[in-house]
Amino acid sequence: MTELVNKRVTMNRALTEYMLAQAEPPISSQQWLIDATAALGASAEMQIPHEQAVLLSFLADIANAVTIVEVGTFTGYSTLALALGLKAGGVVHTYDISSEWSGIASKAWADAGVADRIKRYTGPALDGLAALPAGQFVDMAFIDADKAGYVDYWNELVPRIRSGGLILADNVLYSGEVVSAAPSHNALAIVEFNAHVRADDRVESVLLPISDGLTIARKK
Ligand SMILES: C[S@@+](CC[C@H](N)C(=O)[O-])C[C@H]1O[C@@H](n2cnc3c(N)ncnc32)[C@H](O)[C@@H]1O
């Protein structure tokens, strides 16, 4: 246990600010989207933080992603990050059960010049994923919606990911509740999801302690 503590930095506010200062700063359309989402109030906490957006753009670029599938659009910050990392001619297909925030998302995507790279679908994501064609045509997927649905989203997505493609899942530490003695319903769903990923020999994966925890899995 001593080794665990010594080799890993426990983040505090000063370290978090320092870490953030090392990331590429938000472009103007991203900053507008951060501000517009913050103005919504409490629901703004659903937006991924900027350093995670930088990582998503980076991974999409490294994966040479042409087809990306996202589960959980909200106001479109992660969608924008994924679209910025796409290869020319690529598309992000993004699913959300609600259209409440689509106006904000559309404005940010248009301002960033990536609106033509994004296809947005409204409705339960599981129905949308199940309707996707069979075959390994997805280069990258990002799961960030209802926690109880994660295992089902994973099961729909893995067969559609190409060999070497990536599946990412957000909130996999669930504010630390994954190790709680009395986890909430959502935290239990995440514990089940993490075990599901760990046992899936179609992928290799790593859980990163960035933001609320991000799993990165690569299809073998
Ligand atoms: C955490 S937010 C996504 C945040 C977004 N990735 C971002 O960075 O701004 C989760 C989203 O999942 C959506 N959602 C919840 N249940 C869903 C379902 N069954 N199908 C599709 N979307 C769902 C919610 O409406 C919400 O917008």
Image (cartoon, rainbow, N blue to C red):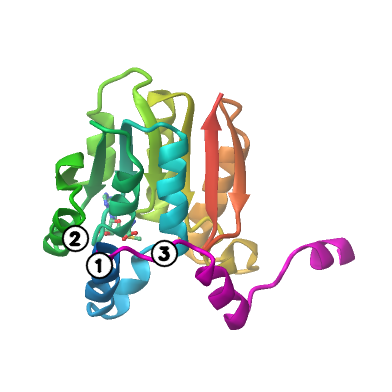
- What residue sits right under mark 1 in the picture? 33
What residue is at 45 percent from the left and 61 percent from the top?
24
Which of the labelled discs sits on residue 50, or is there none?
3
Query: Do tag 2 and tag 1 residues touch (Cβ < 8 Å)?
Result: yes
Ligand number 1: quarter of image: bottom left
Q: Look at the numbered disc 3 and give the secondary structure of its residue.
A: helix
Front residue (pair 32, 194) = 32
Taking the magenta stretch, the answer to whether it contains residue 59 is no
How far apart are labels 2 and 1 at the CA level?
A: 6 Å
How far apart are labels 2 and 3 at the CA level?
A: 15 Å
Residue 205 visible within the image? yes
- What residue sits right under mark 2 in the picture? 108
Please tell me which of labels 3 and 1 falls first in the chain: 1
Dividing the picture into quadrants, the one containing residue 36 is: bottom left
Where in the figure is residue 194, as x and y percent of width and height? 57, 47
What residue is at 13 percent from the left and 60 percent from the top?
107
Three-letter amino acid code of the residue under disc 1: Leu
Q: Which region of the structure is painted magenta?
A: 1-28
- Left or right: 104 with respect to 45? left
Q: Look at the numbered disc 1 and give the secondary structure of its residue.
A: helix
Three-letter amino acid code of the residue under disc 2: Ala
Please tell me which of labels 2 and 3 falls first in the chain: 3
